[in-house]
Image (cartoon, rainbow, N blue to C red):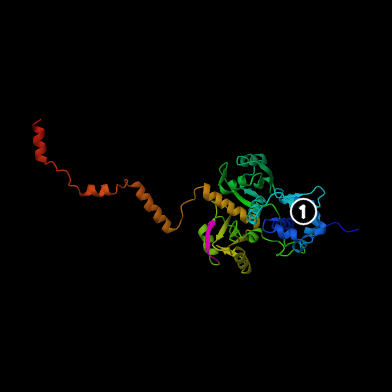
Amino acid sequence: MPSPTQPLSDTARKAVRDLLLIYFCNSEINGTVANIPKNVISHEDWLAGWIPISTLASFKRLQAITKDPLEIARAAVELAPAIFEASLDGSKLRRRIPFDGKYAAEIDAREAISRNIVQVHGFGASTATTEVRAYFERFGPVVHLAAVGPVDKGTFNVEFANVQDMVKVLAQSHVYEDMQIQVQGKSKIAREPSTPSGTTAAAISSLETHAGVTTYPHNRIVQFVLSDPQITKLVIKAAAEQFASVHSIDLERDADAGYIRFKKSVAKEVVNVIERQGGLQVNGERVELRSLEGEEERLYWSVSKYRAENIESPKPLDAQSRRVHSRQKRRAERAPYNGRNARRSKNKAPPPKVKVDELQALLQGL
């Protein structure tokens, strides 16, 4: 009796779905059908667009992940229900709609962002879970809320029903009963130490690479955690720029965690170099670093985009920007510029002045 098949991990299930999206996209579907032996598909199924899952399971790249047709069917209909449809007996698969590689990459981007939650910290010890839920439900429906550790520590994981509500919460600053509340995005999927057995990097295909598009800049964000909340953005930036050019530092007031945005795709490499050198020390304190990947990095860029489009950013701190801003402010405070009329008025002769003695004589005659 054969042993039951080991369930696929979340990473492997996504890899299966990604390969199916490639096999069934407009540019590849004809090649996929051409690789199916004629004797395993009926003319009626061919006209209806059905493809035997057992045949898909024989494709080399899918075999590197799983040979189980049931797991392949589950990955398709559970992770991409708007695109894939399985037959009633679960033996065949077809696409519901035609789609190209770019559409598949966009689906992957939206689905990846939904694999995040919001972790919040800073609520008082006496704040009840119901109060925390009520606060965040002002932004949108909350699917799940749970304390991280003891409730009196004030840390909670919040899962929203809608991705856009989560992005909106992360893009804003929060104060509850005069307490600054820290929020950060966090993947709700535990990181796996390695890819599943038998799965290679080549097998886990990138939909963006296949489509030739990029939905967000990759490998540019490093999250840092401070042990000393007095450390400033400028100090963090100076320390990070010893390794690579930094675009900006995201650090909210009184927060103990923030993000380094590099100008180039070097985040993983920078973290590896720093760790080999014994870690990053700032003011004698160690700063914990972690490069963002996958759904967490996608979420970061979604929040940045929302913030740029909907929330006015603070004035830049560099000297040149301050000078420009000051000049613009002085100009705005001055009287409006009348252009040519102003210059003409300067050239006109001033009206004749009345002499003091003439004015006195005039007053005496009244």
Q: Quadrant of residue 19?
A: bottom right
What secondary structure do most residues of the magenta stretch adopt? strand
Q: Nearer the viewer, residue 26 or 65?
A: 26
x and y, in percent, of residue 124 in the image = 62, 44
Classify 142 as above or below 36.
Answer: above
Q: Residue furthest bottom?
A: 277
- Residue 127 in sight from this viewpoint: no
Q: Would you say residue 245 sits in the magenta stretch?
A: yes
Q: Quadrant of residue 160?
A: top right
Residue depicted at 75% across the width and 51% down the height: 47
**Segment colored magenta:** 244-249
Q: Which quarter of the figure is the C terminus placed in? A: top left
Which one is in front, 29 or 320? 29
Quadrant of res 146: top right
Residue 216 placement, left or right of 37? left
Where is residue 73 shown, x and y percent of the image?
A: 77, 53
Q: Amino acid at mark 1?
A: Trp
Q: Is residue 133 visible?
A: yes
141 vs 9: above or below: above
- Give 72 or 315, whichever is nearer the viewer: 72
Q: Which residue is mark 1?
A: 46
Secondary structure at badge 1 equals: helix
